[in-house]
Amino acid sequence: MSDAAPDFDTAFVAQLDALLRWRRDVRHFRSDPVPEADMQALMASVSLAPSVGHAQPWRLVRVRSADRRARIADHVDAQALAAADGYTDPAQRDRYRALKLHALREAPEIVAIFSDDRPVAGHGLGIATMPEMLRYSTVMAVHGLWLAARARGIGMGWVSIVDPPALTAMLDVPADWTLIALLCIGYPAAPSDTPELEQRGWQAREPLADRLFDR
Ligand SMILES: Cc1cc2nc3c(=O)[nH]c(=O)nc-3n(C[C@H](O)[C@H](O)[C@H](O)COP(=O)(O)O)c2cc1C
């Protein structure tokens, strides 16, 4: 506990806005490693996330085995090939194939984040009607990690072209842990304020007015 609440002044707010604008999903990484102290700080940031009933359902797995990493990368490549076949329009299929959708082979760090569907902590508070709140809590933790990384100049890429039970098996974790995020972490090759999918003409940011409703 600390009594000294920080005063978040307007300069900090401007910096926070810049952090939100410059957070990116990164698929192109430099090869230099992330210092272990920074990795530890990023992991610690996860513990600060909000969670339903304070259940803290996130479970972090650092993938340190080269063999496991290679198997995960092969798995994601196979899933991406299958996903490409789902595009019936040949031009769209080619555009999908041209995208870089993960950096699992070259990113300095790989972390998988699971959500425990039956955590002891939290004693069931808040999940009687919406058990999915546990997974939402873990998503919040991933976002906090994303921002904590970017504030340190470290990039993160979220890979979801995965068959979750396959990853659960590859990483040898309990069956009631649900995969939330497979993350590539390292220094971005080229920081940007524009999403890569927007840069490549796949999808631009849509106007907020189209997504904001008054009732
Ligand atoms: C839940 C989630 C899953 C994602 N999965 C992938 C993925 O499998 N491969 C990929 O390249 N990007 C993935 N992304 C990144 C999005 O493509 C990216 O967030 C979006 O294009 C906006 O770009 P930005 O994050 O740089 O603002 C994912 C993002 C989220 C939030």
Image: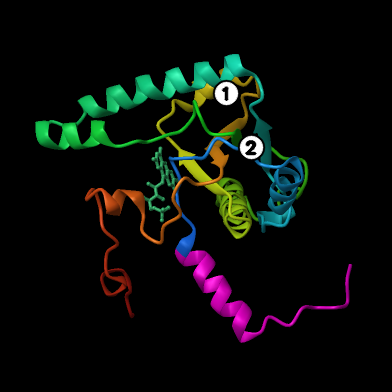
Which dot marks residue 168? Answer: 1
Asked if residue 49 is positioned above or below residue 124 in the image, the reply reads below
Side (left or right) of 39 relative to 165: right
Q: Is mark 2 within 8 Å of ligand 1?
A: no
Which mark is nearer the camera, 2 or 1?
A: 2
Q: Is mark 1 within 8 Å of ligand 1?
A: no
| Distance from Cα at disc 2 to Cα at disc 1 | 26 Å
- Between 170 and 32, the residue placed more toward the observer is 32
The quadrant of the image that shows the C terminus is: bottom left
| Residue 157, image x, y percentages | 48, 43
| Residue 23, image x, y percentages | 49, 58
The quadrant of the image that shows the N terminus is: bottom right
Label total for image: 2
Residue 100, located in which quarter of the rendered image?
top left
Which dot marks residue 2? Answer: none
* Residue at 55%, 45% in the rendered image: 187
The residue where tag 2 is placed is 33
* Residue at 40%, 31% in the rendered image: 161
| Residue 89 in view, yes or no | no
Asked if residue 33 is positioned above or below residue 149 in the image, the reply reads above
- Per the image, label 1 sits on a secondary structure element best described as helix
Residue 205, located in which quarter of the rendered image?
bottom left
| Residue 156 in view, yes or no | yes
> What's the magenta region?
1-21
Residue farthest along the bottom direction in this orientation: 10
* Residue at 33%, 73% in the rendered image: 212
Side (left or right) of 198 relative to 175: left
